[in-house]
Amino acid sequence: MTLAFNPYQEIASTAARFVTSDGEVTTAIGNLILSRRSLPTAPLYLDYRPCVAIVLQGTKSVTLGEETIHYGVGDYLLTSIELPVTSRVTCASHDVPHLCFVLAIDLERLSSLMGRTDLPKVKDSSVCRRAIGANVATPELLDAATRLLRLLDRPEDIPVMAPLIEEEIFYRVLAGPDGCRLLSVASAESRSTRVARAVGWLRDNFHRPLRIEELAEVAGMSLSSFHHHFKSLTAMTPVQFQKKLRLHEARRLMLVDGLDVGSAGHRVGYQSPSQFSRDYSRFYGMSPLRDVSALLVGQTGAMRAGLSRADG
């Protein structure tokens, strides 16, 4: 019997040598992180940074607003701006753990590449209306990712070769169906970049009362245009986005820093403890006290990791 060729076998086995236990490993290649999970996970509430994440084994889902993206072996997830998401590993085992190759987007290298390349024409920009999306990795993209991983066995080659291969990975994504999404990351006046400026401001000031006019001014957009493009990219209104940031940070403050419910709610900007508890219960499915108690008892280690900034 002839066994079918598995194009992901080499890259998966190479990655497995460098991430031998569950969690994320920062590699000698500064922009490259490898992730492993040996079991399906509960929903994790994370901040995804701009990156290209290729699934090497297992399957995963990510929810942005009310929309859920399912992706698995051979797919890559492209995130173009920082987003608060709900992430789950949906298929993994000790024998076949979920493995993921995550390359952070280096804007300097991306901009350099754009200056030397005839960019692909976007036939249908509607496919890139969200700031996150999944597509099938081409053989060329997979080959470049494999060669980048091989450099971990030749650390002396990393300073010269890693930047070149990273640019090739960005080029392969640019040439594919997600080209418009990646292109928007490096364009100073694109709607993604303008909304990203507003998102950055909102992250730094989420505890303050929200004034949409102020956010639109940060983005350099009219109020109506800002509303439209913000929801188009993030699948949320600015108010919903702020609420997610507040609840995510409040949960971290209670679980990691040990704040009580009232103090955590006030720290993130809630003036009413009862409103904080209602919003928290709607989002996490139980009251703040019950939720944090359950996490501390059953899933402290895994959820502590899940409360930090993360990649796809």
Image: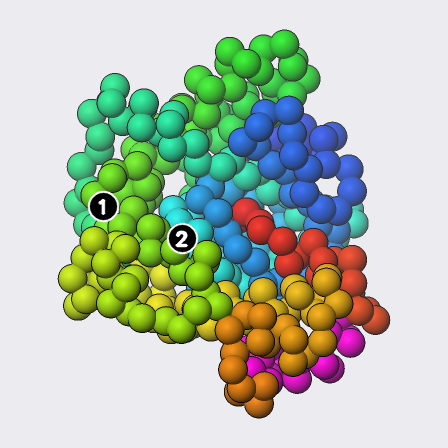
Closer to the camera, 247 or 184? Answer: 247
Is residue 149 shown left or right of residue 202?
Answer: right
- The color scheme shown is rainbow
Viewer-side label of 2, 1: 2
The majority secondary structure of the magenta stretch comes to helix
**Residue 296 visible in the shown view:** yes
**Residue 69 visible in the shown view:** no
Q: Tell me which segment is drawn in magenta.
A: 276-295
Residue drawn 58% across the image and 86% down it: 273
Is residue 147 shown left or right of residue 19?
Answer: left
Where is residue 223 drawn, in percent x and y?
19, 66
Residue drawn 64% across the image and 24% down it: 28
Q: Which residue is mark 1?
A: 190
Reading the chain from its start, which is encountered first: label 2 or label 1? 1
Where is residue 222 drawn, in percent x and y?
16, 62
Residue that lies at the very extreme toward the bottom in this rendered image: 274
Within 10 Å of disc 1 (Cα), the crowding (few <14, some 14-19, many 20+) is few
Q: Find the distance from the CA under tag 2 to the CA under tag 1.
A: 15 Å
Closer to the camera, 211 or 149? Answer: 211
Residue drawn 58% across the image and 70% down it: 267
* Residue 200 numbered tag: 2
Q: Is residue 293 above or below residue 302?
A: below
Where is residue 210 drawn, in percent x and y?
37, 71
Q: Is residue 21 above or below residue 232?
A: above
The N terminus lies in quadrant:
top right
Secondary element under disc 1, as helix, strand or loop, is loop
Task: Please state which amino acid type lies under the numbered disc 1.
Answer: Ser
Where is residue 24 drawn, in percent x and y?
67, 43
Task: Please state which amino acid type lies under the numbered disc 2.
Answer: Gly
